[in-house]
Image (cartoon, rainbow, N blue to C red):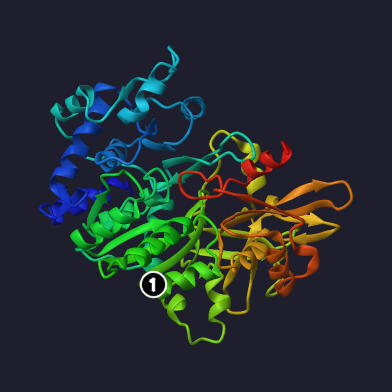
């Protein structure tokens, strides 16, 4: 069940179909992509002497060679360790050492700050930079056949963001990722041969994981020349390439929609925008639907069950005449086809409809364990269920609405306050561009609600009045901090830990 068989099949059946595009220009067809992957795989196996199950790290910005390196790693029976390109070199070193990586691929923009720090005598047998001689020489090695891997064998070792301590390595098998791909087809979107998946978000994360459905269909893969998210570039690519599909964080969706509105750009070149990775506010998705039409699908997942806990279909998002439409578009949809999802109390008992508790999930997409971390594994995987750490409520029709991460819930005077509820209200103000709500320690109440707000011409009294019109008095912020921007990671999530640190220094 080697994932590389997806590329083998595509190349045999449709060798001349365009595979990798650099901007709007075709760089490689499927025959060329498979041949290059087979040669890199041969080098890893025969020249470096790597054995099935050895780990290969990819510390790379989005790059035209990313896909061939991914598939070469699996082709040789090895394990991919994708590393966030925004991490500090010392953070990268922790991952390399913890994963006991045997080889490293690093793009030129990141190589200088890392190579000098690599310790001697480590498990590392080779460091390669696409575009340089050492990488080019890999193409001189004869190709090999794919190495057999069992369904349960490790394929993808993904390190969590580490917001509550050292990052943990999530162990995803070939079976897990095949199941995730099946869920894309059944719950997210169809893929046609002339569709194009554009990597506007990091290939080391969700955008990269969604390569599989497009390889399976021998569709196109577009790496933007900018290497990431640029609204003007995406609009241009939608016209030049057509049938553009992408994964975007809600903040990226908002920026794209605002750009399209500002320049009155055409939208017919976009097929599907899958969004997730953070809260999408009702006002924002309504605006997006009004501007771009029914081109959106929401997914909810996490590294431990990647992209595959729930999905909110384009049909539900477009069903504006449904009496519960506003409530439903605030949800993250139904459980995906290959998983069970429940909302439970601390004892693991399923809660009644519309009750808030922790979200748990089980199924073919759920990780086997955390890498070399049995203590964290036992806390997160219990009796076959993944305890997500996310709080939510499920209605009688199976729609799941996220509240917040359990660690982000604010307990003030003994009452639970969910930041997203307050954020949704504040986003109703037309001058509010972004907002993030956190708890601040307080001697009297335990915690009080504090809001960081991005916008112009705002004052606290107007926001207070808005809150008092829509939510209970005890939930309104006790303080507002007006800022130019919110701290985010490279896939659009607001870093609430950074906001808490800012508060501690005030």
Q: Which residue is drawn at 64% across and 58% down?
A: 404
Secondary element at image label 1: helix
Residue 218: horizontal and vertical position, in percent? 21, 57
Residue 28: horizontal and vertical position, in percent? 15, 46
Q: In this view, does 92 lie above or below 270?
A: above
Tell which of 281 and 211 is nearer to you.
Answer: 281
Residue 179 seen in this snapshot:
no
Residue 442: horizontal and vertical position, in percent? 83, 47
Looking at the image, the residue that sits furthest to the top is 120
**Quadrant position of residue 432:** bottom right
**Quadrant position of residue 469:** bottom right
Q: Residue at x 35, y 46 (%)?
A: 228
Left or right: 356 with respect to 312? right
Residue 410: horizontal and vertical position, in percent? 75, 55
Tell which of 488 and 271 is nearer to you.
Answer: 488
Looking at the image, the residue that sits furthest to the right is 444
Left or right: 151 with respect to 165? left
Q: Residue at x 18, y 59 (%)?
A: 240
Residue receiving disc 1:
291
């Amino acid at each position: 069940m080697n994932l590389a068989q997806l590329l083998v099949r595509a190349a045999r059946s449709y060798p001349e179909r365009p595979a990798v595009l650099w901007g709007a220009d075709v760089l490689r067809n499927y025959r060329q992509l498979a041949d290059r992957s087979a040669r890199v795989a041969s080098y890893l196996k025969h020249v470096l002497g790597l054995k099935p199950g050895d780990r290969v790290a990819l510390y790379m910005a989005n790059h035209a060679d990313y896909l061939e390196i991914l598939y070469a790693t699996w082709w040789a029976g090895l394990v991919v360790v994708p590393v966030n390109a925004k991490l500090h070199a010392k953070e990268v070193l922790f991952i390399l050492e913890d994963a006991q990586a045997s080889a490293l691929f690093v793009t030129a923009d990141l190589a200088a700050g890392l190579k000098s720090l690599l310790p001697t005598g480590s498990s590392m047998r080779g460091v390669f930079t696409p575009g340089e001689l050492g990488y080019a020489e890999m193409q001189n090695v004869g190709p090999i056949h794919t190495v057999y891997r069992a369904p349960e064998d490790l394929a993808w070792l993904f390190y969590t963001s580490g917001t509550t301590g050292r990052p943990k390595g999530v162990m995803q098998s070939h079976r897990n990722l095949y199941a995730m791909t099946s869920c894309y087809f059944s719950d997210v979107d169809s893929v046609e041969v002339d569709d194009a998946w554009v990597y506007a978000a990091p290939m080391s994360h969700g955008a990269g994981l969604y390569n599989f459905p497009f390889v399976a269909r021998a569709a196109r893969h577009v790496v933007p020349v900018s290497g990431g998210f640029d609204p003007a570039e995406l609009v241009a690519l939608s016209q030049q390439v057509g049938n553009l599909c992408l994964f975007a964080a809600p903040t990226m969706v908002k920026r794209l929609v605002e750009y399209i509105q500002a320049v009155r750009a055409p939208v017919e070149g976009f097929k599907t925008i899958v969004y997730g990775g953070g809260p999408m506010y009702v006002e924002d998705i309504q605006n997006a639907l009004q501007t771009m039409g029914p081109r959106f699908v929401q997914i909810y997942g996490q590294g431990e069950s990647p992209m595959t806990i729930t999905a909110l279909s384009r049909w539900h998002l477009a069903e504006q005449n449904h009496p519960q439409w506003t409530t439903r578009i605030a949800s993250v949809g139904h459980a995906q086809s290959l998983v069970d999802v429940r909302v439970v109390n601390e004892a693991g008992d399923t809660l009644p409809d519309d009750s808030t508790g922790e979200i748990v999930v089980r199924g073919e997409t759920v990780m086997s364990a955390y890498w070399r971390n049995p203590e964290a594994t036992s806390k997160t995987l219990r009796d076959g269920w993944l305890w997500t750490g996310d709080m939510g409520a499920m209605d009688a029709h199976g729609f799941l609405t996220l509240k917040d991460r359990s660690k982000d819930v604010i307990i003030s005077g003994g009452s639970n306050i969910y930041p997203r509820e307050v954020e949704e209200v504040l986003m109703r103000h037309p001058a509010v561009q972004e907002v993030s709500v956190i708890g601040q320690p307080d001697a009297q109440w335990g915690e009080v609600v504090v809001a960081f707000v991005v916008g112009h011409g705002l004052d606290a009294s107007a926001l207070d009045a808005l809150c008092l019109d829509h939510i209970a008095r005890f939930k309104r912020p006790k303080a507002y901090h007006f800022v130019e921007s919110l701290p985010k990671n490279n896939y659009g999530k607001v870093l609430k830990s950074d906001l808490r640190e800012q508060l501690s220094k005030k």
